[in-house]
Image (tube, rainbow, N blue to C red):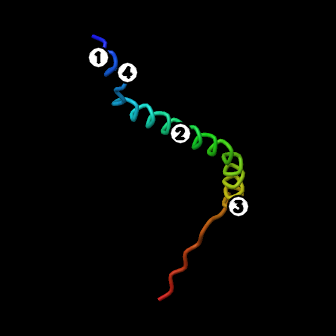
Amino acid sequence: MLNMIKNFANDESGAVTVDWVVLTAAAVAMAVAAGSAILPQIETLLNGAKGELTGFSPTVTITE
């Protein structure tokens, strides 16, 4: 019985899974933080582009 408890205490088969879960959660958290940090600048850039393109009417001239 004591030998079985020692084997259970030394078993590390699930440790790799826990490491990957923690690393993946950290990567997702960093991506969300980066995305929320740059989102206002992206919105400003897109609103500026929208302002420039509003009312734009391209004309096509075909010459033969």
Of the residues under marks 4 and 1, which one precedes in the sequence?
1
Quadrant of the frame with the N terminus: top left
Residue 26 screen position, x and y as percent: 55, 38
Q: Nearer the viewer, residue 33 or 13?
A: 13
Residue 26 numbered tag: none
Quarter of the image holding residue 8? Answer: top left
The residue carrying mark 3 is 52
Please tell me which residue is depicted at 33% across the width and 30% down the height of the picture.
Answer: 13
Badge 1 crowding class, 10 Å Cα cut-off, few under 14, some 14 to 19, many 20 or more, is few
Q: CA distance from mark 4 to mark 3?
A: 66 Å
Work out how far the residue at label 4 is from the one at label 2, CA to CA, in angstroms: 31 Å
**Mark before the other along the chain sequence, 4 or 3:** 4
Q: Tag 3 or tag 2, which sits nearer the N-term?
A: 2
> Closer to the N terminus: mark 4 or mark 2?
4
Q: Is residue 25 above or below residue 49?
A: above
Could you tell me the amino acid type at mark 4?
Ala
Label 3 Cα neighbours within 10 Å, binned few <14 / some 14-19 / many ≥20: few
Q: Residue at x 43, y 31 (%)?
A: 18
Is the residue 19 above or below the residue 56 in the image? Answer: above
Q: Which residue is mark 2?
A: 28
Residue highlighted by disc 4: 9
Q: Which label was assigned to residue 3?
A: 1
- The residue drawn where x is 59% and y is 72% is 59
- Dot 1 or dot 3: first in sequence order is 1
* Relative depth, front residue between 45 and 10: 10
Q: How far separated are the C-alphas under marks 4 and 1?
A: 10 Å
- Residue 51 x %, y %: 71, 56
Q: Tell me the amino acid under the disc marked 1.
A: Asn
Q: Quadrant of residue 30?
A: top right
* Secondary structure beneath label 4: helix
| Residue 60: percent from left, percent from top | 55, 75
